[in-house]
Image (tube, rainbow, N blue to C red):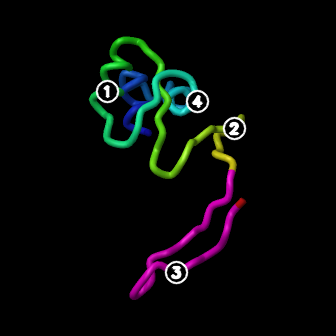
C-alpha cells in the first residue's frame, strides 16, 4: 500500500498521507495483492485505484487511523507473545 502511494505521489513525501487514502479509498479499479504491474499502469495513466490488501479493506478516518480492532504481539523467545487488543 505504501509503495503504491509513493508511486501515486511521484516520490513527493509531502503528498503521502493523501495518497495513502487515495489508493485505498474505495474509488477506482480494484487492485489485489500481486497486481503491482496493473496498479502501476493505472497510476501512470492517471486513473484511480482501490488496493485490496490480504488483511481486508482499509479505510482511513479523519485522523489517519484505520478503524477496527487490532492485536499487538511481540516476538518472544520461542514464539509470538500476545501483548494487548487495541480498538
- In the rendered structure, the answer to whether residue 56 lies left or right of residue 38 reads right
**Which range is magenta?**
68-86
Q: Secondary structure at mark 4?
A: loop
Mark earlier in primary sequence (1, 4): 4
- Alpha carbon of mark 2 to alpha carbon of mark 3: how far? 29 Å
Compared with residue 76, is residue 33 higher up or lower down, i.e. above or below?
above
- Alpha carbon of mark 3 to alpha carbon of mark 1: how far? 38 Å
Please report the residue visible at 44 percent of the width from the left and 39 percent of the height from the top.
Answer: 1
The reply to whether the C-beta atoms of the residues labelled 1 and 4 are less than 8 Å apart is no
Within 10 Å of disc 2 (Cα), the crowding (few <14, some 14-19, many 20+) is few
83 within the magenta span: yes
Query: x%, y% of residue 25?
Result: 58, 29
- In this view, which residue lies farthest toward the top? 45
Q: Find disc 1 in the rendering and name its residue.
A: 38
- Alpha carbon of mark 4 to alpha carbon of mark 3: how far? 33 Å
Compared with residue 70, is residue 13 higher up or lower down, i.e. above or below?
above
Mark earlier in primary sequence (2, 3): 2
Give the label, 1 or 4, closer to the camera. Answer: 1
Mark earlier in primary sequence (2, 4): 4
Within 10 Å of disc 1 (Cα), the crowding (few <14, some 14-19, many 20+) is some
The reply to whether the C-beta atoms of the residues labelled 2 and 3 are less than 8 Å apart is no
Q: Secondary structure at mark 3?
A: strand
Please report the residue visible at 65 percent of the width from the left and 44 percent of the height from the top.
Answer: 65
Query: x%, y% of residue 77?
Result: 40, 87
* Disc number for residue 81: 3
Q: Nearer the viewer, residue 68 or 9?
A: 68
- Alpha carbon of mark 2 to alpha carbon of mark 1: how far? 27 Å
Q: Secondary structure at mark 2?
A: loop
Q: Considering the whole magenta stretch, tell me its main secondary structure.
A: strand
Amino acid at each position: 500500500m505504501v509503495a503504491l502511494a509513493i508511486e501515486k505521489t511521484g516520490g513527493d513525501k509531502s503528498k503521502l498521507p493523501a495518497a495513502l487514502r487515495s489508493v485505498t479509498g474505495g474509488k477506482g479499479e480494484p487492485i489485489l495483492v500481486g497486481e503491482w504491474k496493473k496498479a502501476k499502469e493505472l497510476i501512470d495513466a492517471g486513473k484511480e485505484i482501490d488496493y485490496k490488501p490480504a488483511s481486508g479493506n482499509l479505510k482511513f478516518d479523519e485522523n489517519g487511523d484505520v478503524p477496527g480492532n487490532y492485536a499487538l504481539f511481540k516476538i518472544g523467545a520461542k514464539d509470538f507473545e500476545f501483548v494487548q487488543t487495541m480498538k
